[in-house]
Amino acid sequence: MNSKSLTQRIDKWLWCTRIFKTRTNAKNACQSGAIRVNNEVAKPSTPVHISDEISVRIHGQERKLDVLLLLEKRVGAQIASAAYLDKTPQVIASTKQISGAKNGERDRGSGRPTKKDRRRIEQFRHPS
């Protein structure tokens, strides 16, 4: 980022750091109230400063990020991850992976269960 400019729009920062795939998705998340900057709901044009705390709600999961760098353009994943400090509790991050396995849910669009899967689901639902 240019040394003269010490702020950046939140929607652009979220896109540059690869939190969202498109800037439009970042803008829509801001408009729906899923983004907070320093515990205040952010509009897409809300300025972000270094050391701001950002809360992002994506797919029912809350991520907490601290801004370390302001990026001028979208960069690779390694550089993008260096632009923020992820303070999301690890317990919350790991529950997403485990939650589907515990209640017998399958990923949407993964097709019909195979015979083996169906037997496991029935075994789980109705233990002998």
Image (spheres, rainbow, N blue to C red):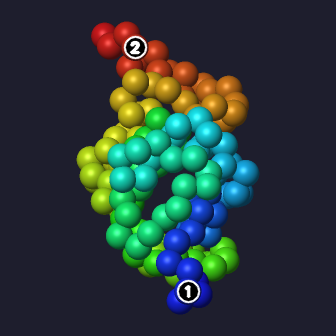
**Residue 126 x/y as whole percent:** 37, 10
Q: Which quadrant of the figure has residue 14?
A: bottom right
Dot 2 corresponds to which residue? 125
* Residue for point 46% across, 15% down: 122
**Residue 30 x/y as whole percent:** 58, 45
Q: Could you tell me if the residues under marks 1 and 2 are in contact, i.e. CB atoms within 8 Å? A: no
**Would you say 50 lies left or right of 22 here?**
left
* Residue for point 47% across, 35% down: 60
**Would you say 20 lies left or right of 99 here?**
right
- State the quadrant of the N terminus: bottom right
Mark 2 surroundings: few (<14), some (14-19) or many (≥20) residues within 10 A: few
Q: Which kind of residue does numbered mark 2 sit on?
A: Arg
Q: Which quadrant of the figure has residue 22?
A: bottom right
Q: Earlier in the sequence, mark 1 or mark 2?
A: 1
State the CA–CA distance, disc 1 to disc 2: 61 Å
* Residue 87 seen in render: yes
**Would you say 36 lies left or right of 4 here?**
left
Instruction: Name the disc covering residue 4, or none.
Output: 1
Element class at badge 2: helix
From the viewer's perspective, is residue 57 above or below residue 22?
above
**Residue 97 x/y as whole percent:** 41, 44
- State the quadrant of the C terminus: top left
Mark 1 surroundings: few (<14), some (14-19) or many (≥20) residues within 10 A: few
